[in-house]
């Protein structure tokens, strides 16, 4: 009898493992990237990907134009990741993927906690996908290297997005006619430009970015300094100066407006409208950027889009 019970238990275990191995992949709303997430992960609501709240782990999915693969993969080196506060550990080989891919392992310390990161960049036919897995160290047994590698092996790029990626964002905004290029960013932000990014369009035309800046609320007393820090901490802008600041109230939120100036990587002077809005305490950053000589032309449109902002959270 005991042998029968042990055999039955073994069969049940094998069936459970097979069911897990062949579970249907999941595509988050607005994304073309699907995968079979490890047990304990659900679809995230504040970014494109999956979240394991109990263990503080996440899987973020980001899509780039197809020309980006060479640039991104060549930048996955120790010096480049160090600029983002990470230490490169190794390059990993992820088997079973029908795409050219580059995967690195790194570690990063945030708020006193050490994290293990897997960053896999995939060269799809008409899109480049990046899958970033973040797991706190030491990793729990259910998030072992083998479990994460199996999830990465399941990644596939679909022909179309799972719904409208802009509609899936945690906010809405009404772009003015100037901004014909509209690109969602990781399910929590949107880039608006007069033209697409290079090589199809211009680098330094007028642009506008909206993003959810953090997953936690910001206390009222800290909201002004939080908005300032988001601008001052940007590594893409040099010679940064905040020229003025004032409280602001829109039809759906309140926060602070900053006028600022700085330079892009080429050294060209730029001017900025930065608005930090806090609906229900959640921090959203809205930033209009234009060459210095075109800023006054664009400012009324920047402010009109700020007025149209609505949080969906």
Image (tube, rainbow, N blue to C red):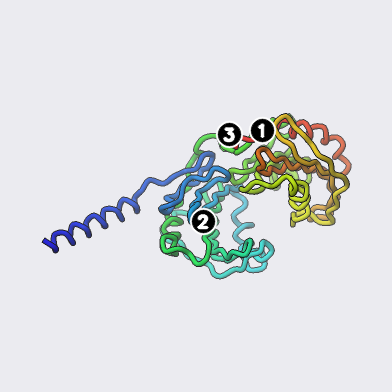
Q: Residue at x 48, y 41 (%)?
A: 159
Measure the C-alpha gap from mark 3 to mark 2: 26 Å
Residue 53 coordinates in the image, percent (x, y): 50, 52
Measure the C-alpha gap from mark 2 to mark 1: 28 Å
- Which residue is labeled 2 in the image? 57
Residue 11 coordinates in the image, percent (x, y): 21, 56
- Which residue is labeled 1 in the image? 310
Q: Earlier in the sequence, mark 3 or mark 2?
A: 2
Kindly indicate whether the residue at mark 2 contacts the one at mark 3 (C-beta within 8 angstroms).
no
Kindly indicate whether the residue at mark 3 contacts the one at mark 1 (C-beta within 8 angstroms).
no
Residue 58 coordinates in the image, percent (x, y): 52, 54
Query: Which of the two residues, 63 or 19, is positioned nearer the viewer here?
Result: 19
Quarter residue 140 falls in: bottom left
Furthest residue toward left: 1
> Nearer the viewer's eye, disc 1 or disc 3?
1
Q: Residue at x 73, y 44 (%)?
A: 220
Q: Earlier in the sequence, mark 2 or mark 1?
A: 2
Furthest residue toward bottom: 89
Image height of 195 relative to 199, above or below: above
- Res. 196 visible in picture: no
> Nearer the viewer's eye, disc 3 or disc 2?
2
Image height of 146 relative to 261, above or below: below
Label 2 SS:
strand
- Which residue is labeled 3 in the image? 167
Label 1 SS:
strand
Q: Tell me the quarter of the image containing the N terminus.
A: bottom left
């Amino acid at each position: 009898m005991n042998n029968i019970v042990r055999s039955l238990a073994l069969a049940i275990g094998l069936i459970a493992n097979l069911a897990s191995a062949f579970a249907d992949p999941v595509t988050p709303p607005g994304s073309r990237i699907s995968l079979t997430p490890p047990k304990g992960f659900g679809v995230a609501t504040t970014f494109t990907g999956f979240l394991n709240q109990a263990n503080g782990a996440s899987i973020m999915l980001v899509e780039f134009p197809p020309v980006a693969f060479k640039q991104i993969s060549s930048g996955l080196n120790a010096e480049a990741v160090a600029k983002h506060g990470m230490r490169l550990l190794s390059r990993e080989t992820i088997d079973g993927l029908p795409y050219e891919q580059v995967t690195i392992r790194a570690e990063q310390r945030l708020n006193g906690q050490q994290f293990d990161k897997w960053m896999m960049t995939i060269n799809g036919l008409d899109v480049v996908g990046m899958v970033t897995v973040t797991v706190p160290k030491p990793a729990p047994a259910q998030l072992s290297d083998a479990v994460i590698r199996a999830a990465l092996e399941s990644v596939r790029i679909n022909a179309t997005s799972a719904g409208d990626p802009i509609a899936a964002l945690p906010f809405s905004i009404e772009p003015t006619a100037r901004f014909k290029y509209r690109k969602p960013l990781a399910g929590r932000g949107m880039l608006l430009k007069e033209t697409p990014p290079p090589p199809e369009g211009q680098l330094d035309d007028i642009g506008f970015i909206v993003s959810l800046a953090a997953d936690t609320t910001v206390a009222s007393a800290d909201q002004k300094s939080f908005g300032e820090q988001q601008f001052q901490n940007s590594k893409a802008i040099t010679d940064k100066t905040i020229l003025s600041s004032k409280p602001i109230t829109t039809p759906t939120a309140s926060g602070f407006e900053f006028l600022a100036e700085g330079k892009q990587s080429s050294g060209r002077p730029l001017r900025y409208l930065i608005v930090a809005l806090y609906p229900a305490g959640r921090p959203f950053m809205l930033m209009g950027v234009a060459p210095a000589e075109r800023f006054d032309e664009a400012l009324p449109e920047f402010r009109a889009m700020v007025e149209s902002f609505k949080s969906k959270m």
